[in-house]
Amino acid sequence: MQKHDALFSKKSAPERSARMVETIYGCKWSLTVYQLLANGINRPGAMVNHVEGLTTKVLNQCLKRNVEFGILDRVTFSEIPPRVEYQVTSFGQKFLRILDELEKLQQELDANDS
């Protein structure tokens, strides 16, 4: 038998993006925050007021994680009283499309199980 040259190298999961998806889906509130932003609710106080059970502490942790990943951008206005708003970055738009596709896949799987 003749040894064949390897045509393909071992494929592994994309480390950073896979961890990002896992972290975002693992956060109970991230998807809700994206929904709020899509509906024009971009100030933390308003977010807390619009979602039952969401606390300021948990929201701030969620927002911070999303800013660190580059999904959201924190915009600070130099006003008195201080005002902070969040917006989805261009990278975040791409990432949210991937999450939408995952949700569609889950709906397809759920429909096939019925």
Image (tube, rainbow, N blue to C red):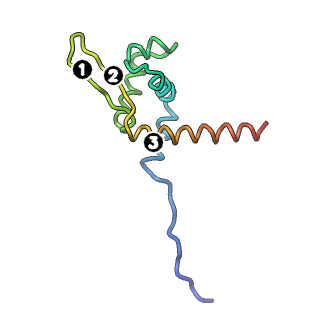
Tags 3 and 1 touching, CB below 8 Å? no
| Residue at the image point whose x is 48% and y is 37% from the top | 96
Q: Is mark 3 on a helix, strand or loop?
A: helix
Could you say which disc has been placed on residue 20 in the image? none
* Position of residue 47 in the picture relative to residue 76 (left or right): right
Q: Mark 1 points at which residue?
A: 77
How far across and how far down the image is residue 67, in percent?
35, 33
Q: Residues within 10 Å of mark 2 (few under 14, many from 20)?
A: some
Q: Name the residue under label 3.
A: 94
How far across and how far down the image is residue 35, in percent?
50, 25
Tags 2 and 1 touching, CB below 8 Å? yes
Residue at the far bottom in the pictured view: 1
| Residue at the image point whose x is 26% and y is 23% from the top | 76
Q: What residue type is labelled 1?
A: Phe
Pointer 3 or 2: first along the chain: 2
In the image, residue 87 above or below residue 103: above
Q: Mark 2 points at which residue?
A: 85
Q: Which amino acid does label 2 sit on?
A: Glu
Q: Distance between the residues labelled 3 and 1?
A: 26 Å
In the image, residue 74 above or below residue 57: below
Q: What element carries label 2?
A: strand
